[in-house]
Image: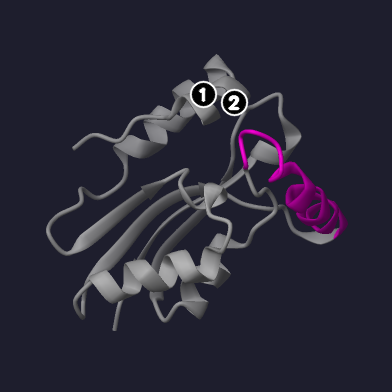
Amino acid sequence: MTPVLDDHHRLRLGPTAASAWTRRLAGLPPPDGTSVLLVGALCHEPDLDAALARIRDRLPAGGRIVFLEHVGRPGLLGRVEQVWGHAAARFPWSCHVGRDIPAAVRRAGFFVTDLERFTMPTPVPVLRAWVRGTAVKP
């Protein structure tokens, strides 16, 4: 299964960023029967911790999450994004910007084994910070 960039993110990222995003996907390990692939999916979840708990409950011990998600920036700008993100989630695209996805994955009981932070070349400032990683259920 090759994940594709959904229309929601493609429209907001623009063509240059969408192309860069596709290159990032090529480096993700392929999912198998004991893994879940999350690509730009967690920003839509109203309750991030509950969504990750449901995923954890479905996976066997040693199962993994492979993720590519946009996140908040560190520092003051990140805190502003987080506040703005709660308001933006009420819009039709329901995207919660400013979340700390790796921290949420750890809170859900996963061990993050691989993590890369990078900047996406997009005209939308709140969609520039992304993470790519793998987490394992102990």
Callouts 1 and 2 close, C-beta under 8 Å: yes
Q: Is residue 81 left or right of residue 113?
A: right
Relative image position of residue 65 (x, y in whole percent): 33, 62
Image quarter where the N terminus lies is top left
The residue under label 1 is 10
Q: Residue at 79%, 47% (x, y): give it.
A: 87
Relative image position of residue 43 (x, y in whole percent): 56, 49
The residue under label 2 is 13
Q: Is residue 6 visible?
A: yes
Judging depth in this view, the residue of 71 and 23 nearest the camera is: 71
- Mark 1 and mark 2: Cα distance apart in space: 5 Å
Q: Is residue 70 left or right of residue 108?
A: right
Q: Identify whether 21 is placed above or below 51.
A: above
Magenta stretch: give its range.
76-94
Q: In what element is the residue under mark 1? A: helix
Q: Residue at 40%, 53% (x, y): give it.
A: 67
Q: Indicate which disc residue 51 carries.
A: none
Q: Identify whether 126 is placed above or below 14.
A: below
Is residue 84 shown in magenta? yes
Q: Is residue 61 left or right of residue 56?
A: left
Label 1 amino acid? Arg
Relative image position of residue 93 (x, y in whole percent): 61, 34
- Tell me the quarter of the picture where residue 118 sits: top right
